[in-house]
Amino acid sequence: MAATLAVSGAALADITIGVSLSLTGPGSGLGIPMQNQFKLFPSTIAGEKVNLIVLDDASDPGKGAQNARRFTTDDKVDVIIGSCLTPVAAAMADVATGAKTVQLAGSPVGLPPGKDEWVFRLPQSNTVMGHAVVEHMVKQGVKTIGFLGYTDVYGEQWLKELTPQAEKAGIKIVAVERFARTDIGVTAQALKLVAANPDAILVVASGSGAAMPQLGLVERGYKGKVYQTHAAASRDLMRVGGKAVEGTYVVSGPAVIAEQLLDSHPSKKVAIDFVQKYEKAVGAGLRNQFAGHSYDAQIALEKAVPLALKKAKPGTPEFRLALRDAFETMGRTVFAHGVMNWSKTDHWGYTLETGVMLKVVNGEFKVE
């Protein structure tokens, strides 16, 4: 299903953007908020008309790759945005790189060195967010942890990042359990983790699916601390988890708790702008980590496009190359989710100070 938010069939000077999001399937809790923010996308950038083409990848890597191929071959897009799920974004990256088209990934997709030449990440890296989680665990006196995460690349990347950081902090991982995004329960995994009795458990899941494993832990009697990753930083966690997620620690970018940021925080003004515009459009209290990434994509393009236009016209290979170069050289840029500074050697861009630790208190996120 295609939702074209502006007229497609681009003329040479139009800027065409292909967006692939998980609007159905397990990732829809992330993709729909991103789509909601894209509905607020400007009709022009730097005086050029914008054609925004939004496709559903159904939370499926194969479908995401198919969408990316359509964008690059049929639509001749200038930039690809998506997807909100790491496995889907990874599948899209191969196509984007092959077509020499910039991809702004909506998930923290890890790629082998040299394979991300055309891929820039809008979310914070798991390294950056893992730093905030481990730092908080140390302050909480956590000495042992369990891991309960997806079997896919998102879970694997978190385990890979968490292990050395935890070891360096003197925290021992005593149990590792995995589950699939499509699983409806984690009874066996929860029993093993409860038996290991770690001080804390890190759940690595996303959107509304992040509540299920925690419900399983609580049902099996786990009484320790529970941490969740930035893919769970949405109200879906509380909506689905209810009382079971009270007291949960969630790492997030700053956009989700804009008003709670210190006035000195560089992202406060931008984050509040995002929250106010988004919630005016979709409803009070519905701010979302992933909707914030869509907002930040607009900021990035509004800064990079004028630089690229000095070198080439949209719709050409030269413009796509100029756009990639612009992202690498545009310098310090304030996002709703932190300060971004992509470079030729760093397509992640955020600093270690970016992650914010939240706690679920009375069904709301509160800054720790």
Image (cartoon, rainbow, N blue to C red):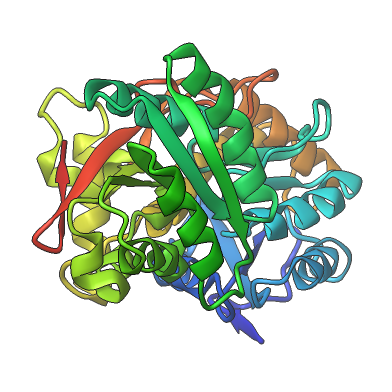
Q: Which residue is drawn at 83% across and 70% down?
A: 66
Residue 166 is situated, as x and y percent measured from the top left of the image, at: 47, 23
Q: In which quarter of the image is residue 51?
A: bottom right
* Relative to 259, residue 308 above or below: above
Expressed as whole percent of the image width and height from the top left, the position of residue 264 reads 14, 22
Q: Is residue 182 above or below residue 290?
A: below
Q: How many labels does the image show?
A: 0
Q: Which residue is drawn at 66% across and 35% down?
A: 308
Res 337 quadrant in image: top left
The quarter of the image holding the C terminus is: top left
Q: In front: 229, or 64?
A: 229
Q: Quadrant of residue 214?
A: bottom left
Which residue lies at the image location 51% right of the left edge and 74% below the top edge? 185
Residue 348 visible, this angle: no
In this view, 181 is above or below 266: below
Report x, y in % for residue 45.
Answer: 50, 52
Of residue 323 and residue 94, the one placed in the foreground of this image is: 94
Left or right of 173: which side holds 120? Answer: right
Which residue corresponds to the image point at 63% horizontal and 32% vertical from the top-left?
160
Front residue of 354/218: it is 218
**Is residue 209 rendered to the left or right of residue 322?**
left
User: Residue 323 in the image: x percent, y percent?
Assistant: 68, 37
Q: On the picture, is 206 further left or further right than 19?
A: left
Q: Nearer the viewer, residue 246 or 260?
A: 246
